[in-house]
Image (cartoon, rainbow, N blue to C red):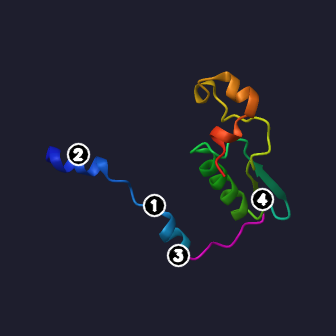
Amino acid sequence: MPLRRAVRRLGRRPESPWTSLLESELPEPLTEAAGRRVLLATGVGGHPMAPVVDGLVGTSLWLRGAEVSFLLCDRVLPACEMCQYVAFPQVEEFLARGPQRRLCPP
C-alpha cells in the first residue's frame, strides 16, 4: 500500500457500527438474569471510556433478561474520580469552588 494512502486511512475515523446494529432485529432476551434489577452507577461519567463500558455491560445484562438502569453524576457530588490534580493549576480554586465549575459543564 502506498504511503500516502496509508496515511489518509490513519486520519479517518472508523465508521460506527451502531447504525447497523440498531437497525437490525433485536435477539430474544435470555432468561439467565430474568427479574433481576441492576444499577450501573459510574462516578466518572465524564471519562471517555466509562459510559462505553457501562453501555456494553448493561446491554449484555439486558440481553440476559435483567432490568438495567444507569446513573450518571449530576454535579451534586463534592468531588469524583475526574478530579485530578492536573485539572487544577491552583489548588485554592478546587478548595473554594469544588470541581463543578471546571469539570462539570452544564
Taking depth in this image into account, of 29 and 104 the one nearest to the observer is: 104
Mark positioned earlier in the residue sequence (3 or 4): 3
According to the picture, the residue beneath numbered tag 4 turns out to be 69
- The verdict on residue 77 being magenta is no
> Which amino acid type is shown beneath numbered disc 1?
Ser
According to the picture, the residue beneath numbered tag 2 turns out to be 7
Which residues make up the magenta segment? 24-32
Question: Seen in the image, is 66 located left or right of residue 14?
Answer: right
Residue at x-position 74% and y-position 47%? 73
- Residue 57, given in percent of the width and then of the height, sits at 67, 52
Identify the disc placed on residue 66: none
According to the picture, the residue beneath numbered tag 1 turns out to be 16
| Viewer-nearest of discs 2 and 3 | 2
Tags 3 and 4 in contact by the CB under 8 Å rule? no
Crowding around mark 3 (Cα neighbors within 10 Å: few <14, some 14 to 19, many 20+) is few
Question: Seen in the image, is 51 located left or right of residue 10?
Answer: right
- The verdict on residue 28 being magenta is yes
Residue at x-position 63% and y-position 50%? 51
Between the residue at mark 2 and the residue at mark 3, the CA separation in whole angstroms equals 32 Å
Between the residue at mark 1 and the residue at mark 2, the CA separation in whole angstroms equals 20 Å
> Which amino acid type is shown beneath numbered disc 3?
Glu
Between the residue at mark 1 and the residue at mark 4, the CA separation in whole angstroms equals 24 Å
